[in-house]
Image: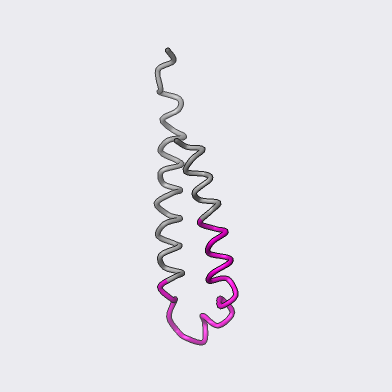
Amino acid sequence: MKMLLLVLAGANMLVFHLVAGPSTLHWNEAGMTPWQGKIAGLISLMLWIGIVAFGRWIGFAAVP
């Protein structure tokens, strides 16, 4: 599960850089972060919390 979340985090980064990346130079002029940046940040935050949680869980998982 941790590896799946890592792949999804990488995909989120790739999509962010392809979709919103070119417009990041103009974000300071607008005075507000576009919704695409906020959504990408929220998804990234949730994925990394999951990655850390599953990483911690690996040490406590029972080995069959």
Dividing the picture into quadrants, the one containing residue 31 is bottom left
Residue at the spot 45% in from the left edge and 41% down from the top edge: 52
Seen as rendered, the residue at the extreme top is 64
- Pinpoint residue 62: horizontal percent, then vertical percent: 40, 17
Seen as rendered, the residue at the extreme bottom is 29
- Considering the image in quadrants, where does the C terminus appear? top left
Decide which of 55, 1 is in the foreground and name it: 1
Q: What stretch is highlighted in magenta?
A: 12-35
Decide which of 29, 2 is in the foreground and name it: 2
- Pinpoint residue 41: horizontal percent, then vertical percent: 44, 62
Mainly helix, strand or loop, the magenta region?
helix
Decide which of 19, 30 is in the foreground and name it: 19
Residue at the spot 52% in from the left edge and 82% down from the top edge: 28
How many numbered marks appear?
0
Q: Is residue 40 magenta?
A: no
Colour scheme of the rendered structure: one colour
Residue at the spot 40% in from the left edge and 65% down from the top edge: 39
Q: Does the magenta stretch include residue 21?
A: yes
Residue at the spot 43% in from the left edge and 54% down from the top edge: 45
- Considering the image in quadrants, where does the N terminus appear? top left
- Pinpoint residue 9: horizontal percent, then vertical percent: 50, 50
Vertical relation: 21 (above or below) 44: below
Decide which of 28, 10 is in the foreground and name it: 10
